[in-house]
Amino acid sequence: MMALHHLCPGEKIHLASSQSTASARKLALVKTDAFESVQLLLRAGEEISPHFVPGYATIHCLDGRVVLQTDERIEMEAGDWLYLDRGQRHSVAALDESSLLVTILLE
């Protein structure tokens, strides 16, 4: 099994748009002792079931529209950013083809 390529410090990457024809729907960008970053490409109607991560998490909607469900319903569109508390349960549903940049602080 081949290991995932993670970016090296200073290595540049162009993040795919939601309209990308890339086969990967989850692109691992960086994983260090301190944080992990991934890009998620979601098709309209696609959902990520309720889950949580142990550390703080940030979600930046690069393009498209999604609904983030926590204790409340939060609609996000291109340019919106938020963070989640440690262990905060959440789910994601794509209203349109969408691209999210997710960063998780590891503790």
Image (spheres, rainbow, N blue to C red):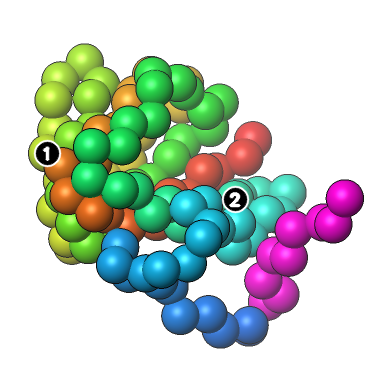
- Give the residue at mark 1: 75
Q: Nearer the viewer, residue 97 or 66?
A: 97
Residue 36 bears which disc, if any?
2
Viewer-nearest of labels 2 and 1? 1
Residue 14 image offset from top left, x and y in percent: 46, 80
> Would you say residue 90 is visible in this rendering?
yes
Asked if residue 89 is positioned above or below residue 17 in the image, the reply reads above
Residue 60 image offset from top left, x and y in percent: 30, 54
Within the magenta stretch, is there residue 47?
Answer: no
Q: Is residue 106 left or right of residue 67?
A: right
Residue 39 image offset from top left, x and y in percent: 46, 57
Q: Dot 2, crowdedness within 10 Å: few (<14), some or many (≥20)?
A: some
Q: Residue at x 22, y 62 (%)?
A: 63
Asked if residue 16 is positioned above or below residue 83 in the image, the reply reads below
Q: Residue at x 60, y 50 (%)?
A: 35
* Prevalent SS, magenta region: loop
Q: Residue at x 24, y 54 (%)?
A: 97
Q: Dot 1, crowdedness within 10 Å: few (<14), some or many (≥20)?
A: some
Residues drawn in magenta? 1-9
Report helix, strand or loop for mark 1: strand
- Looking at marks 2 and 1 on the same chain, the residue that comes earlier in the sequence is marked by 2
